[in-house]
Image (spheres, grey):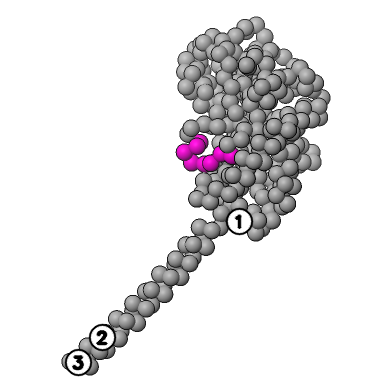
């Protein structure tokens, strides 16, 4: 009986040792996984993946060359240079940007408007790159000056599906008929062919669209609805990357770089930037 007990005890010790070893290996793997933060991965791979979405003037992909220009790509290039890494641009949409971050398809989504809902799932850099006001490109003959006037069941308004403009009309323009499109080009087409009375976007985008369509008028209805565009990243325990972005993005904004990138893009599209409200809050027309 004593010999049997010894054999059982020996086997139990070996089993316990095996379990401890397995637990130790699992713990090591967990720690390694936890340490693989976005910052560490970028530094290790020497590549930063930045999301881009076809949405002028924030992002524009030339269909002939495939080259990206706009505020976002200019920012991405400056960020990669500051970090000493290569830049990889990954095309997404406003509606899929959050999922792309969460799945590690991209590391950064610049110029994403700040909303409490988005802040539930991602972190922001906490240093906005731009400020812009919601505006309407309305057909000739309309004279909408307030958001109350726009909340009319007789009006059809085109918005980008899933974007912050979509959230705005859902909350504040519930009486109007809303057409939701995945791209700005489709919104513009709806306006051009008369299916939409107005296009609702932020004023920098509408300025570019108005120059292209050549009809209608742009108004920034009151009360002004001003939003800030920040940089979104994955939420993770290690806040090194977020803290770095707060410093870098604050520098780009405060030194006027973001405004310079905006004006340079407008000029590249044949527009005079002096006739368009800026993207810095303190310089924005009508905002004190």
In the displayed structure, would residue 254 be above or below residue 172? below
Ranked by sequence position, the earlier of labels 3 and 1 is: 3
User: Neighbour class for label 3 at 10 Å: few (<14), some, many (≥20)?
Assistant: few
The answer to whether residue 122 is magenta is yes
Q: Which residue is mark 3?
A: 2
Residues rendered magenta in the picture: 118-125
The quarter holding residue 192 reads top right
Q: Is residue 50 visible?
A: yes
Q: Is residue 205 visible?
A: no
Describe the element under mark 1 as helix, strand or loop: helix
**Is label 2 in contact with label 3 (beta carbons under 8 Å)?**
no
Residue 90: image location, x then y, percent: 66, 45
Q: Residue at x 22, y 90 (%)?
A: 4
In the displayed structure, would residue 226 be above or below residue 10? above
Ranked by sequence position, the earlier of labels 2 and 3 is: 3
Q: Nearer the viewer, residue 144 or 112?
A: 112
Q: Residue at x 47, y 62 (%)?
A: 30
**Is label 1 in contact with label 2 (beta carbons under 8 Å)?**
no
Q: Which residue is mark 2?
A: 8
The quarter holding residue 185 reads top right
Residue 109 in the figure: left or right of residue 170: right
In the displayed structure, would residue 256 be above or below residue 106? above
Q: Nearer the viewer, residue 115 or 166?
A: 115
In the displayed structure, would residue 19 be above or below residue 160? below
């Amino acid at each position: 009986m004593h010999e049997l007990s010894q054999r059982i005890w020996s086997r139990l010790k070996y089993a316990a040792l095996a379990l401890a070893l397995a637990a130790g290996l699992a713990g090591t793997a967990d720690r390694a996984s936890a340490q693989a933060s976005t910052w560490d991965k970028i530094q290790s791979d020497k590549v930063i993946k930045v999301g881009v979405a076809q949405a002028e003037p924030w992002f524009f992909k030339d269909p002939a060359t495939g080259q990206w220009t706009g505020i976002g790509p200019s920012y991405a290039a400056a960020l990669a240079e500051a970090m000493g890494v290569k830049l990889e641009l990954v095309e997404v949409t406003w509606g899929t940007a959050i999922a792309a971050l969460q799945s590690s398809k991209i590391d950064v989504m610049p110029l994403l408007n700040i909303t409490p809902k988005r802040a539930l799932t991602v972190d922001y850099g906490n240093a906005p790159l731009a400020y812009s006001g919601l505006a309407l490109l309305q057909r000739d003959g309309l004279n909408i000056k307030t958001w109350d006037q726009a909340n009319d069941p007789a009006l059809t308004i085109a918005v980008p599906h899933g974007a912050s403009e979509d959230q705005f009309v859902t909350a504040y323009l519930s009486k109007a008929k809303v057409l939701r499109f995945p791209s700005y080009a489709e919104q513009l087409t709806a306006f051009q062919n008369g299916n939409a009375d107005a296009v609702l976007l932020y004023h920098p985008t509408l300025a570019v669209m108005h120059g292209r369509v050549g009809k209608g008028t742009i108004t920034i209805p009151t009360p002004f609805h001003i939003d800030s565009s920040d940089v979104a990243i994955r939420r993770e325990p290690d806040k090194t990357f977020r803290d770095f972005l707060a410093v870098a993005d604050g520098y780009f904004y405060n030194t006027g770089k973001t405004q310079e990138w905006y004006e340079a893009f407008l000029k590249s599209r044949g527009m005079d930037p002096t006739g368009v409200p800026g993207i810095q809050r303190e310089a924005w027309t009508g905002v004190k």
